[in-house]
Amino acid sequence: MQARFRSIWAQLPSKLQDALLPYAGNDNFPAMLTAAQAKSVKKTCGFDDNTLAIALLPLAAACSLAPISHFNVGAIARGESGNLYFGANMEFTNVPLQQTVHAEQCAITHAWLRGEKKLVSITVNYSPCGHCRQFMNELNSGTQLEILLPKQEPSTLGDYLPGSFGPNDLGITTLLMDPINHGYKLETTDELVLTALDAANRSHAPYSNSYSGIALLGKDGKIYPGRYAENAAFNPSLPPLQAALILMNISGGDCLAIERAVLVEGKNSELSQQSATQSTLAALGCSKFEYHTF
């Protein structure tokens, strides 16, 4: 079992411990449950979907990186596939607070990077802030996305965000998590560059058309891609580096152990992720940064 889960494990109900152990007990546990695994746990524990998601929140919160606030938030995104994706808040020292990742953003991006096409619900242990409500409003789930909190009746995003402003107001029809491929190419055989290019081609940037993607090579030898996720309100947009850090952290990697990073974006884009990415990577101790354009 990964060290981050050990301290919270004993606090879980014994039946849930037994049901989760074959999955979460593995050092390679990817902080998600497949639909089949979730079904098995629900059957063993007598849970429905919502009860299981709430029961998993302590494990999700254990993935939190909160050196500034020391306030751990966990989230569970349930996909249309039935898969459950963990998320947690992530903070980084020596960079602006705008680089912070919220737990809901983490769970959503985790699901998106794993190939989930649509979300049914988001479960979180604290009420979603306005930033997260706006971020969720970009999703193809729409305002019917279910929001679940412990000891509260289920609500929808529409309940949390009445009179919302979103992509529909700007005539945008391709929404966050819709499958897309922008089709850009680069002449290279470098795996890290190609991974970053693929991420850029799958990025969501309908307002600026400034598609960008990144790939991080961890010192564990694994590659972690990240895609830009733009928002109708602009500020809640998630940079590609944060997306890659989400996948790295949630998968059990070390965000302070990045061996090499490659950012790919359009050379004629109105926006650039280059300077912000480079400065944040430097704060994380990564000096091998490469920049490519298509």
Image (cartoon, helix red, strand yellow):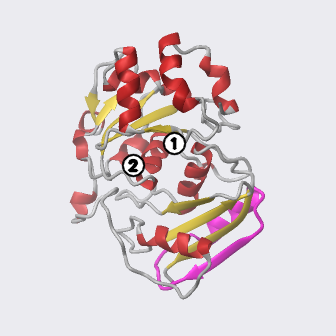
Relative to residue 210, is residue 66 drawn left or right?
A: right
Residue 102 got which mark? 1
- The image position of residue 92, as x and y in percent, is 68, 47
- Residue 259 in the image, given as x and y percentages of width and height: 74, 62
Q: Mark 1–mark 2 contact, CB under 8 Å?
A: yes
Residue type for callout 2: Phe
Q: Is residue 286 magenta?
A: yes
Identify the secondary structure beneath mark 1.
loop
Give the mark nearest the N terminus, 1 or 2. 1
Give, as a single range, the part of the protein colored magenta.
267-294
Q: Quadrant of residue 8?
A: top right
In the rendered view, would you say 11 is above or below 223?
above
Residue 190 visible (yes or no): yes
* Left or right placement of residue 104 versus residue 146 in this view: right
Residue 43 on image: x %, y %: 34, 20
Name the residue rendered at 24%, 43% in the picture: 143
Q: Quadrant of residue 78?
A: top left
From the image, tell me which residue sits under label 2. Answer: 135
